[in-house]
Image (spheres, rainbow, N blue to C red):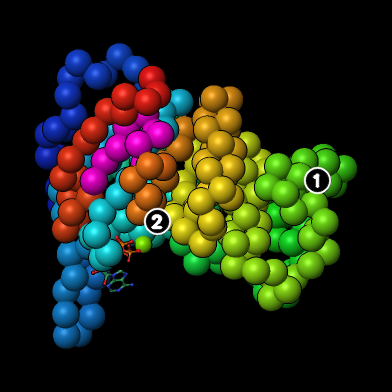
Amino acid sequence: MMLSAMAAQKSTVDESQQAAAPMFLMENISKVYRTDLIETHALRSFNLRVNAGEFVSVTGPSGSGKTTFLNIAGLLEDYSAGRYFLDGVDTQGLGDRELSRLRNNKIGFVFQGFNLIPDLSVFDNIDVPLRYRGLPAAERKRLIGETLERVGLLSRAKHFPSQLSGGQQQRVAVARALAGSPAFLLADEPTGNLDSVMARQIMDLLENLNDQGTTIIMVTHDPDLAARAHRHIQIIDGEVAEVTRSSMRG
Ligand SMILES: Nc1ncnc2c1ncn2[C@@H]1O[C@H](COP(=O)(O)OP(=O)(O)OP(=O)(O)O)[C@@H](O)[C@H]1O
Ligand SMILES: [Mg+2]
């Protein structure tokens, strides 16, 4: 990863929070996209600490940096400056192999655009991250069956993404992220294409996973779903603008 000019900058995280183990810690993260003509500051001085077992929801206007933030959190994208610790590991000095190992072992990702592989069946799409983790075939098969049942798509295991509705594809994308019970789940609008009943069911699933110990960061535009998280943060113009602790949960 890029050497950071801001690495020496002092932590802005509240000292009183230091006791609990942070699953996730970003300090003064910035991300600049550069082309020949323009520079876009997608994130600027982004600070966030998420403790193990927390469920954090994220809202913000279109273009405010939510996906950029999740992609960096999920080690899918590099940052321009600042520090990012994942489960105690400073991600700055890591090479590609270490990054993918961390990602495969710890992180489940629900992409905003699903990112299903078109020429793989539903079953095989969910199998991809499980294979990367090196799980034996019989266990993968059991996990995939269980997860498909949880998202109500057991009967679609052999279908291809193009043979599914948008909502079904979204549920496959959620199933793929859940199947390995990752320690850390990042979800970008996981209910964006679902009706309100299905959205609540997916939210129930995520809460269930969170109750079992998975730390979750979820981007959503739905204020009702956002309010169900432990903590809700709002991103405006690449910065954390507001943090609200939920009255509904912990
Ligand atoms: N690859 C890229 N190259 C250049 N600029 C980019 C790139 N990706 C994102 N941006 C810019 O960074 C900013 C933040 O984008 P991002 O996708 O994080 O927004 P978002 O909050 O997820 O929006 P939405 O709610 O529409 O999904 C935008 O201004 C966008 O144009
Ligand atoms: Mg986005």
x, y percent for residue 178 = 62, 43
Cβ of mark 1 under 8 Å from ligand 2: the answer is no
Q: Eyeballing the image, is 13 above or below 63?
A: above
x, y percent for residue 249 = 40, 24
- The N terminus sits in image quarter: bottom left
Q: Secondary structure at mark 2?
A: helix
Give the residue at x 44% y 55%.
189
Q: Residue furthest bottom?
A: 37
Which of marks 2 and 1 precedes in the sequence? 2
Q: Which region shows up in magenta?
A: 226-234
Res. 160 image quadrant: bottom right
Cβ of mark 2 under 8 Å from ligand 1: the answer is yes
Q: Please say if the residues under marks 1 and 2 sit with CB atoms less than 8 Å apart.
A: no
Looking at the picture, which amino acid does disc 1 mark?
A: Gly
The residue indicated by pointer 1 is: 145
x, y percent for residue 50 = 34, 32
Looking at the picture, which amino acid does disc 2 mark?
A: Asn
Give the residue at x 37% y 25%.
248
Magenta run includes residue 230: yes
Give the residue at x 58% y 42%.
201
Tell me the tag on residue 71: 2
Is residue 157 in view?
Answer: yes
Q: Nearer the viewer, residue 198 or 113?
A: 198
Give the residue at x 37% y 50%.
222
Structural distance between the alpha carbons of marks 1 and 2: 28 Å
Q: Nearer the viewer, residue 84 or 48?
A: 48
Q: Nearer the viewer, residue 85 or 59?
A: 59
